[in-house]
Image (cartoon, coloured by chain):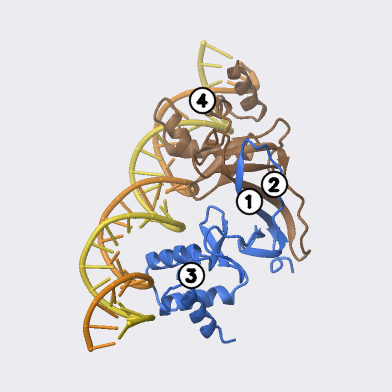
Chain colours: A blue, B brown, C yellow, D orange
Amino acid sequence: MDNKKLIGDLLHAHGLKKTPIRTEMLALFMDHDFALSASDIVAKMTAGHDRVTIYRALSSFEKHGILHRASEDGQGIKYALCGQHCPDEPHTDKHAHFICDECHQTYCLEDVKVPKANISNEFSVTGVSYTLSGICKQCNR
Amino acid sequence: MDNKKLIGDLLHAHGLKKTPIRTEMLALFMDHDFALSASDIVAKMTAGHDRVTIYRALSSFEKHGILHRASEDGQGIKYALCGQHCPDEPHTDKHAHFICDECHQTYCLEDVKVPKANISNEFSVTGVSYTLSGICKQCNR
DNA sequence: ACATAAAGTGCAACAATGTTGCGTTTATCG
DNA sequence: CGATAAACGCAACATTGTTGCACTTTATGT
């Protein structure tokens, strides 16, 4: 796949610069079907880059609707690529996520929509998160 | 309310010892209708106790089905009291939670049940979490 | 009441995640 | 090419959570 071109366009479309680090980061996200944390990325990058750079890139990507938070299970925030039509904050790409108890990967369940909330109107709901856990497709074999 | 007696019974029923620290901790949970984190508790306790002690008490309470994790939003794990009939791990008291974007408190929505998951059987689901966010009843006034 | 075992507490030290400030480098656009 | 804004790297720090070890307190049986 020619992700290089795709990534360049993606960055450009959001007014971000196409740097080697950010290109490699997005390539990593495209190469995995599960979510990645900052430390996952640091570990997978070819050259050893500063953690701060990764954190700042992730924040920027989230703000621009390129990535969304897939889970934050105490071992850090994991991000995944947003769908095609996800705008800047607030994100609208609302689907469920799955966290594996064995390998601790987080998967986006794109086809599982987050259920509508039915709740006392003392609370104003603006966000919903729906997260399943158990054993994932890989560990299940 | 005579929570003192209640708390003693609760601890005893789980084979835990009734110490001043743990009694005060549980009293704190009974006095608040939102979830508390380890640092919340350290701040609210009358005497300055070691963080480690609080962490270990929280873990113990969770293991014995006295507390459950209400949220873990990056600023730490918040716990809340379990319902009457919650057994030891795994917890079965499954309800939704609400996190306020303004005051950052977490509320248990005891009457909002967690929706059933409808998901590919490549994944084995054993846990579900359903968390709403927005503005809470206090901040909404 | 007393001894004992188990549970609970405190201290020190540590690991991991995430942030901020600041100076330098790099990409992009005219 | 030159200017500007974004991106990067380093140092330093805050917070959350853990572990090992020694000591204290609670509950239990006799």
The first of marks 3 and 2 along the sequence is: 3
Do pointers 1 and 4 mark residues of a single chain? no
Q: Which residue is mark 1?
A: A128
Mark 3 vs mark 1, CA separation in Å: 27 Å
Residue A39 shown left or right of residue B128 in the figure: left
**Is tag 3's residue or tag 1's residue first in the polypeptide sequence?**
3
- Kind of residue at badge 4: Glu
Residue hosting label 3: A41
Residue A121: horizontal and vertical position, in percent?
65, 37
Q: Amino acid at mark 3?
A: Ile
For the N terminus of chain A, the image quarter is bottom right
Per the image, the residue denoted by label 4 is B24
Image x and y of residue B127, in percent: 70, 51
Residue drawn at 67 percent across, 37 percent down: A120
Q: Which residue is mark 2?
A: A117
> Residue B106's x, y, as percent?
56, 40
Task: Tell me the element at label 2.
Answer: loop
* Secondary-structure class at tag 4: helix
Secondary structure under tag 1 reads strand
Q: Can you tell which mark lies on residue B133?
A: none
| Residue in the image at 49% along x and 66% along y | A64
Give left or right: position of B122 versus B60. right
State yes or no: discs 3 and 2 in contact (Cβ < 8 Å): no
Check disc 4: other Cα within 10 Å, few if <14, some if 14-19, many if 20+: some
Q: Position of residue A58 (x, y in %)?
A: 47, 65
> For the residues marked 3 and 4, what is the alpha-carbon distance in whole angstroms?
43 Å
The type of residue carrying mark 2 is Ala
